[in-house]
Image (spheres, rainbow, N blue to C red):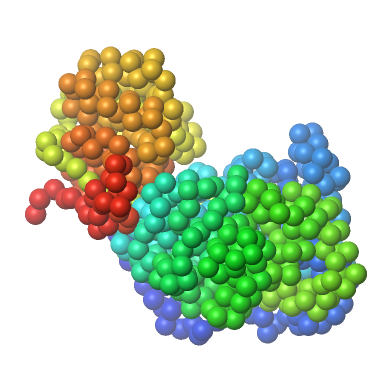
Amino acid sequence: MVSRRGYLVGVLITLVMIAGTSVAGSAGPNTGGSASVDIDRKISNMSLKEKVGQMFVPYVYGESANTTNPADVAANQEMYGVNNAEGVIRKYKPGGIIYFAWSNNVNNPAQIANLSNGIQSSALAQRSKIPMLISTDQEQGVVVRVNEPATQFPGSMALGASRSTEHARTAATITGQELKAMGINQNFAPDADVNVNAQNPVIGVRSFGSNPGLVSDMVSAQVAGYQGGAGISSTAKHFPGHGDTAVDSHYGLPIINHSREELNQIDLPPFQAAIDSNIDAIMTAHIVVPALDPSGRPATLSKPILMGLLRQEMGFKGVIVTDALTMEGVRQQFGDARVPVEAIKAGADMMLMPPDMDAAYGGVLDAVRSGEIKEKRIDASVHRILALKAKRGVFQNPYVDEGAVNSTVGTSQHKAAAGDITDDTITLVKNDTDTLPLQANSGKNVLVTGAGGVAGSQADQADRSTLGSLAYQIAQRGASTTVYETGANPDDASITEAKTRATNNDLVVVTTNKAWASAGQQKLVQSLLDSGTPVIVVATRDPYDIAYFDSAPTYLATYSYRAVSMESLTRVLFGEVNPTGKLPVDIPAASDPSTALYPYGYGLGYGG
């Protein structure tokens, strides 16, 4: 049996060997190489429709490429006028497909591998015979598309709390290896945003932290893990930096009012680190940055930002992919047929998830035929896209072994490594009454309550929720546990019931999930503190929650509600693991956000 620490050491030795033998810009292990593909000849033999198709990355409904499931067929018909992925590929010749749970693409590893192979078969059956980039957003933590049995990690901010670039690289290597085994050859990760706004509604724990140096180091480590360790494409997002906004670009158009000096100091260094690490792709943000482009255009549609800054100043030569074109942040100024045209003119290579594929595809074709966009401009993007596919070996090895998926995805070694890494992320912020560590086999009655969440998709129903997972782990240490989930917005009746239950228990563990944005959660915690029963507060997402109930004597941050985080949290609660995580952000005071209630780098341990 390989120990968890032993497995980590083995992974790191492998990575060191890779780093020592590769050259700048190399494709990494088992990825072929662009020299074996005549890209210019490929492009010269492609029609305009085929070339424009390569610049789009739609989603499709269905768990197989030729699905006949009535719901999936209906959804595809409504979106594209065809039945399934095979039809989408025949109609548009896209360069990529992106997977989601809500589009019924990611039900289990074997199914995903079969879907990927079907998509590649459909792509290679077309006249141009160009394989597909198959992508997803497997950032880990709060943004996960492929759930268990795939190995789960606690996410970027948790890794930032560990301060370990080795952990970041290992997490990316394992995540990338598992994605590759399922036929996913591009991950839209890591998040390179520097989260300097505690009320950021869309980034938060998706960021490694608020320190540009830390974020840069972690981004570089993850690029090395995805591309060097796993041999899949990595994509840094959201350029030029989405970390200081109080508006979610899914629903509005954020404005980043950083000066050029602030951008240079805060937002841009992680992206430069990614570029210096030879990252394959960078995703744009639907944000307005007046210091870079005073026109009011979002970065996705801004030539000064994409061509002037990213290409010319920062030297990026890879693929520029837009964030989803379904998001309101990019749809406020132009219609759906026009947005892709403006994105291409700004410098984008691939258009992600247009809301009206017929309009988007037709709009670009019309722009080229009218001369508004030169065909050589299309050729330049297609060259970058095909070069990326060649670099990652997609031309040479488009298919995966469906029978071998389970030998890579969710192995005991991978999960053990995830557990060890997560142990180093838990941050103890307050322990004023020395409640921690708890004693095992105490026989105490413990109420586990709070916001809850989905910890994973384990077979055991009781272990699927965050609270259920946590209660199970605590019970394994000899306590008698009950669970009462109040939700993220508890009403007065739920709060009263939770307080009543608290008075009938010896200890309360309450989880919060973005309580800084929920008056109900804040009221719940305060009511539990008033119950007279000892209370341990655990922030299972943003660490900023403590600012809204600083009277809580015991407070920990896990940055994640995943089962792996609940397991590590429990080990910390019972003193099996000494907490070593350090805050990767400042926690500002609720009454004065300019004052740090708990500063970056803060974190307690159990003596010693």
Is 99 placed above or below 21 here?
A: above
Residue under the point 40% across and 71% down: 265
x and y, in percent, of residue 295 in the image: 64, 64
x and y, in percent, of residue 362 in the image: 86, 58
Give the residue furthest to the right.
369
Image quarter in which the N terminus is found? bottom left
Front one among 126 and 514 = 514
Regarding residue 232, the answer to whether it shows in the image is no
Residue under the point 43% across and 79% down: 19
Residue under the point 21% across and 52% down: 603
| Relative to 92, 56 lies left or right | left
Image quarter in which the C terminus is found? bottom left
x and y, in percent, of residue 204 in the image: 43, 50
| Relative to 284, 94 lies left or right | right
| Relative to 514, 527 lies left or right | left
Q: Quadrant of residue 360?
A: bottom right
x and y, in percent, of residue 127 in the image: 88, 67
Front one among 464 and 385 = 385
Q: Quadrant of residue 548?
A: top left
Residue under the point 52% across and 48% down: 247
